[in-house]
């Protein structure tokens, strides 16, 4: 499966100018650069794991947006008068009863492999919360959901994948970007069998169509402001 996203900025974003990305993710920064958006990176100081227990309270969409807003609010005050982008991705795996479990970043090989094995031959959802503060101060949020189906794979394959790619920086313990490498070596060896969503950039963690809409919305005046005569 191709990991190519073909992320391009829509016409309304022409002349947007440099934005601030409230993230340390090289993948998110790359998506913006490929879309022709100049980006400065300022990673937020937000402990995502402190919010794991709020899934039942907020729901997947609410949790993803809450995390994105926390990152935005941490970084935006350092960049007055600039457009700031924040995003967070929540992985959700449901069991046969419908109970939701968070897919999280795993700190070591054993736990990453265990999480991958729980996902073998299942379908899960990647919920992206995106928050944008425009240069004029207005804040806009949105949600993108990707449905990902994993093929059935064995324990040895999961162990080999984790050893080779060390996916400790991503929820779910896998990266879409690794699929091309696996498939080029041996067709059918990728862990992901299928993806359904508006755009594959949502799997990487920054859904570009949604972001484009939010940037267009945020480019207007802040709520309550009065236009010059």
Image: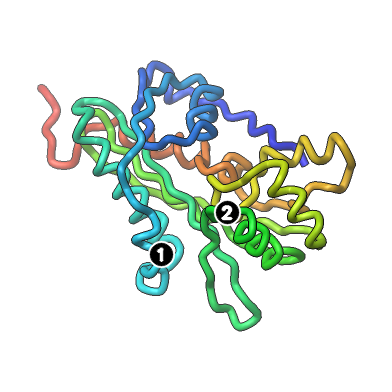
Instruction: Please tell me how crowded label 1 is: few (under 14), some (14-19), or many (20+) other residues with Cα within 10 Å.
Output: some
* Whole-percent x, y for residue 126 in the image: 56, 55
- Choose top left, top right, bottom left or bottom right for residue 61: bottom left
Instruction: Please tell me how crowded label 2 is: few (under 14), some (14-19), or many (20+) other residues with Cα within 10 Å.
Output: few
If the image is split into quadrants, where does the C terminus sit?
top left
If the image is split into quadrants, where does the N terminus sit?
top right
Q: Nearer the viewer, residue 141 or 23?
A: 23
> Residue at left 35%, top 73%?
57
> Residue at left 63%, top 44%?
166
Query: Which circle marks residue 32 in the picture?
Result: none
Dot 2 lies on which element? loop
Q: Is residue 223 visible?
A: yes
Question: Relative to 9, is 70 on the left or the right?
Answer: left
Please give the count of numbered marks on the rendered protein. 2
Question: Mark 1 = which residue?
Answer: 52
Calculate the distance from the C-alpha at mark 2 to the C-alpha at mark 1: 19 Å
Dot 1 lies on which element? helix
> Residue at left 64%, top 29%?
6
Label whose residue precedes the other's in the sequence (2 or 1) = 1
Q: Nearer the viewer, residue 188 or 114?
A: 114
Q: Is residue 145 visible?
A: no
Question: Relative to 3, is 146 on the left or the right?
Answer: left
- Choose top left, top right, bottom left or bottom right for residue 34: top right
Question: Mark 2 = which residue?
Answer: 108
User: Mark 2 or mark 1, which is nearer to you?
Assistant: 2
């Amino acid at each position: 499966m191709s990991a190519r996203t073909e992320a391009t900025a829509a016409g309304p974003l022409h002349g947007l100018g440099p934005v601030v990305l409230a993230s340390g993710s090289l993948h998110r920064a790359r998506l913006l650069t490929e879309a022709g958006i100049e980006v400065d990176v300022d990673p937020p100081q937000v402990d995502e794991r402190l919010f794991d227990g709020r899934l039942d309270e907020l729901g997947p969409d609410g949790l993803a947006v809450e995390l994105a807003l926390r990152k935005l609010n941490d970084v935006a005050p350092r960049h007055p008068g600039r457009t700031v982008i924040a995003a967070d991705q929540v992985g959700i795996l449901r069991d046969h009863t419908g109970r939701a479990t968070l897919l999280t970043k795993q700190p070591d090989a054993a736990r990453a492999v265990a999480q991958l094995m729980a996902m073998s031959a299942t379908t899960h959802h990647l919920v992206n919360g995106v928050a944008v503060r425009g240069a004029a101060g207005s804040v806009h949020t949105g949600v993108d959901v990707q449905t990902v189906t994993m093929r059935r794979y064995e324990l040895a394959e999961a162990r080999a994948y984790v050893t080779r790619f060390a996916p400790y920086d991503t929820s779910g313990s896998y990266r879409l970007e690794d699929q091309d490498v696996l498939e080029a070596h041996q067709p059918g060896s990728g862990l992901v069998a299928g993806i359904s969503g508006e755009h594959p950039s949502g799997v990487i963690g920054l859904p570009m169509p949604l972001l484009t809409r939010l940037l267009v919305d945020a480019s207007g005046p802040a709520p309550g402001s009065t236009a010059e005569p």
